[in-house]
Image: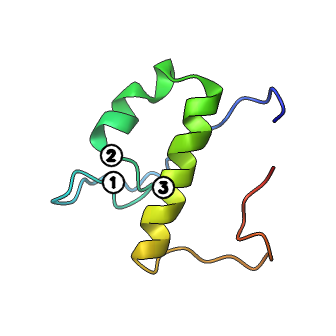
Amino acid sequence: MSGEVVASPCVGVCALDEQDICTGCQRSGIEITQWARMSESRRREVLGLCQARAQSQGLWFSTTPDNGLQT
């Protein structure tokens, strides 16, 4: 992994659902509040969780063979 800063996945659609997951970025309320203090590796883990949440809801769309993940 490179030392690049992992940007916030926030898309400006900030609303938590009944499971405490943001309907915009798919982060939990705790993940959102802790984002600024997370290590880059933890942020990457959270992005993976966001992708899994979006996929499970049919919200993940990708036109690349790697499902949009960058390594």
Residue 16, placed above or below residue 61: above
Q: Residue at x 61, y 77 (%)?
A: 61
Residue 58, placed above or below residue 39: below
Residue 18 percent location from the top left of the image? 15, 59
Whether residues under marks 2 and 1 lie with C-beta atoms below 8 angstroms apart, the answer is yes
In which quadrant of the rendered view does residue 41 lie? top right
Whether residues under marks 2 and 3 lie with C-beta atoms below 8 angstroms apart, the answer is no
Residue that badge 2 annotates: 28
Q: Nearer the viewer, mark 1 or mark 3?
A: 3
Q: Is residue 1 left or right of residue 26?
A: right
Q: Residue furthest top?
A: 37
Query: What's the amino acid at mark 2?
Result: Ser
Q: Is residue 64 left or right of residue 43?
A: right
CA neighbours of label 3 inside 10 A, class few (<14), some (14 to 19), many (20+) = many
The mark that comes first in sequence, 2 or 1, is: 1
State the residue in front, 31 or 41: 41
The answer for how far apart the CA atoms under marks 1 and 3 are is 10 Å
Residue that badge 1 annotates: 22
Residue 50 circle label = 3
Query: What's the amino acid at mark 3?
Result: Cys
For residue 9, say whether it is visible: no
